[in-house]
Image: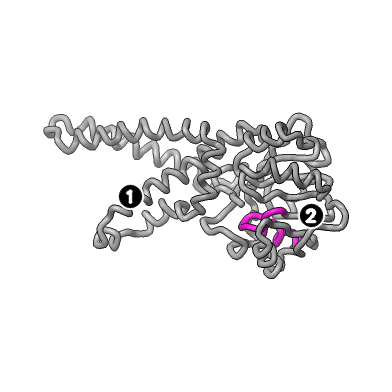
Amino acid sequence: MRSVAVVGTGLIGTSIALALRGRGIVPHLLDADPEAARLAAGLGAGVVGAPRVPVDLAVLAVPPQHVATVLREQQLRGLAQDFTDVSSVKVRPQREAAELGCDLARFVGGHPMAGRERSGPLAARGDLFHDRPWVLTPAEGTGERAVERARSLAELCGARPVVMETARHDRAVALVSHAPHLVASLLAARLLNGEESHLELAGQGLRDATRIAAGDAGLWTDILSSNAAAVAEVLTEVALELNAAVAALRDLAVAPPAHGPTGRAHLNDVLVRGVRGRALIQGRTDLSLSGAAAVP
């Protein structure tokens, strides 16, 4: 793979382009916002504009709801021989691409599991994907050349390719990325009701727990909407446990001492299981999906 085009020069698209520049490939940069493409080029990410002849691979770094339409547009335009994307939802874009009549033999879904709470080309980093999982979700009819080029892209960016089925991917990211983002946002939103004297007591623990809530709200609305069923399934289970914890706390607040041990035992069980769950991803360096969601 010698030539690449990046469509969408936000955080992920520009980071991919910067990583490729470090490996001797000069990407062509395209964006609906020409100023964003020029800004990315000014950072050394590549050259602005479409190539004169089709490149080997086009990377669609656009939100999930736009993947299918952009894929169709760029395939008709003849931008590249093969195509991949980097959106954090896979089932919906692939289904919509099929409905639009896209050539899925030349397309393989991709999702680099790396990101930041900041967005835009100025937040991009060439080492963003170093040693991170990069999920590939080829369809049944995806050509071998497209898969190998998408795999090469991940490796050139310093990531570790992981092949998954689309529905399994969406269930996985609902658990390790999408639902946690919404929970962090709900927790951070409670701070709007806090008094100034309360907020002054906020420490690093709260900042860590709410860090990802600083992400682009519009983009995350698209992500959550595109993976709604899987996220709702995870949050339904969280809600059940949260309601049980609330009930235990209310019992402890009003119950006589003789009834206290039951509520304490329930809270202790919740905390112990939290410690055990956290340990499953602590320091994990194998084919894990425990990183921040990658979003364009």
Secondary structure found at label 2: strand
Above or below, 215 against 163 in this view is below
Residue at figure coordinates x 75%, y 45% from the top left: 73
In the image, 24 versus 63, the foreground residue is 63
Give left or right: position of 229 versus 84: left
> Is residue 151 at least partly visible in the picture?
no
In the rendered image, residue 67 lying in the magenta stretch gets the answer: no
Q: Main secondary structure of the magenta part?
A: helix
Residue at figure coordinates x 47%, y 33% from the top left: 232
Give left or right: position of 209 versus 8: left
Which residue range is magenta in the image?
Answer: 7-23
In the rendered image, residue 17 lying in the magenta stretch gets the answer: yes
Please provide percent x and percent y for residue 51: 83, 58
Please provide percent x and percent y for residue 193: 28, 53
Q: Counting other residues with Cα less than 10 Å from the Cα at mark 1, is it few (<14), some (14-19), or many (20 or more)?
A: few
Above or below, 283 against 124 in this view is above
Q: Amino acid at mark 2?
A: Val
Above or below, 146 against 125 in this view is above
* Residue closest to the far left: 256
- Disc 2 target residue: 4
- Disc 1 target residue: 190
Please provide percent x and percent y for residue 253: 17, 38
CA distance separating discs 1 and 2: 44 Å
Circle on res. 208:
none
In the image, 28 versus 109, the foreground residue is 28
